[in-house]
Amino acid sequence: MSEVKTFRHGIHPPEHKELTASRPIERIKFPDQVVLPLSQHIGAPSRPVVKAGDKVFRGQVIAEAGGFVSVPLHSSVTGTVVGIEKRHHPNGSLAECIVIEVDHTSAQTLYDGHELDWENMDTAQLLEAVRQGGFVGLGGAAFPTHVKLAVPEGKRAQWLLLNGCECEPYLTSDHRIMLEWADSIILGVKIMSRILGTEKAFIAVENNKWDAIKLLRDRIPADMPCELVPLETKYPQGAEKMLITAVLKQEVPSGKLPIDVHVVVQNVGTAAGIGDYFAFGQPLIERVVTVTGPGIVRPTTLLAPTGMSLAKIIEYCGGLTDDAREILFGGPMMGTPQQFMDVPILKGTSGIVVLTEGQLQERREYPCIRCSACLDACPVYLNPSALGALARSAKYDDMLNYHIMDCMECGSCSYVCPSNIPLVQRFRVAKGLLREKQAREKVT
């Protein structure tokens, strides 16, 4: 067995993956309506090209990219556009959305499904195809995939690193994708490697998924420059910078990106989606979602159309338990609590975690005891204790001297703090205020 690699620091929260790790992917039945926000990714929102009353088909473009850092939006169903209006967004805002009433008499086949001859396409054509497919990172960040694959002038991509860690507790959607869609992942790796011109690809998987490690290792062709790398199960192993350090022993400098050390990181779900797109023409119109936690009656791994409401998904999974108290989009470490049940799942929604009252007991905050547990946990070697003291005193400018902008908000410091200090929450506020100040200074 290969050496199990890792990075320094980090934490080991309980995994809770047994609820769904062995549950095969189920396709959920189509709802009566989908709500598709124009903003589903980092960058500029998409611009609608349809209007109320238009008939649309599954996989049809309904909004064009709003800029380079943006992607087209496709209809996830065949139906009729009933409006373009503001609806609740998972980020807590009211956002412009295309609302489509589903045609239940339709077979819901693809609008323009066909194989793409990727082997006879040049780099520019491959990159444009990925853009047209509407792909964003499916690990949660939802950064437009074609932007990541477009190597800037003067840079080079030596390695493609595929992220199959899924280090957040509870989430198992990537695990199921690796087990059930391995061939699609391999095809996606081949296509992305071709676009980037990389020397070698690595598929990194935490060692709590040995079944996926064995399966993928067996599926990698002997003549393909690709290596399966087992990693220690640890949080946040799946963060880009931690992954690069673990696999390649390289450190991404402060303020730099993975491409500055000749690496491009993509999620296994993104690779599988790209593989399927080139195999039979399906753009990003559905995704695998882990619906789990002690507050859901039937934890399930779902294949659901984008735009389906949280309420319909919860209903399909048997509803909530009597003691359910909080619903997160994403995992418990970095997920976003939801206020409304009518919010839709997005391209980047990897999981829905329902927590119970017993898990949400309010804890009293105590003064910092200088124990250094947060320093030992921080994966990017910051001093959360000092940063927390500055944040509490609203000395936000001073936090820049302690490299607050390098904080990736993983929550490891808050998790280990014996004084229950909400460090990561204070850091998010501080970073937001600092960004606002920097933006104002640019304008003036």
Image: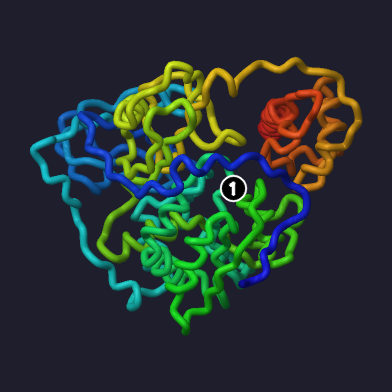
Question: Badge 1 is on which residue?
Answer: 167
Q: Residue at x 35, y 61 (%)?
A: 129
Q: Residue at x 82, y 18 (%)?
A: 366
- 156 w.r.t. 9: above or below: below
Question: Farthest residue toward the right?
Answer: 370
Q: Nearer the viewer, residue 254 or 8?
A: 8
Q: Residue at x 31, y 53 (%)?
A: 283
Q: Position of residue 259 (x, y in %)?
A: 63, 62
Q: Amino acid at mark 1?
A: Cys
Q: Nearer the viewer, residue 415 or 215?
A: 215
Q: Position of residue 173 (x, y in %)?
A: 44, 47
Q: Residue at x 34, y 48 (%)?
A: 25
Left or right of 304? Residue 9 is right
> Disc 1 on helix, strand or loop?
loop
Q: Position of residue 290 (x, y in %)?
A: 43, 41
Q: Quadrant of the N terminus?
A: bottom right
Q: Quadrant of the C terminus?
A: top right
Q: Nearer the viewer, residue 74 or 303?
A: 303
Q: Position of residue 48 (x, y in %)?
A: 31, 37
**Res. 305 image quadrant:** top left
Left or right of 140? Residue 36 is left
**Res. 361 image quadrant:** top right
Answer whether residue 87 is visible to the viewer in this image: no
Q: Nearer the viewer, residue 121 or 36?
A: 36
Q: Residues within 10 Å of mark 1 (few under 14, many from 20)?
A: many
Question: Farthest residue toward the bottom?
Answer: 223
- 277 w.r.t. 234: above or below: below
Colour logic: rainbow
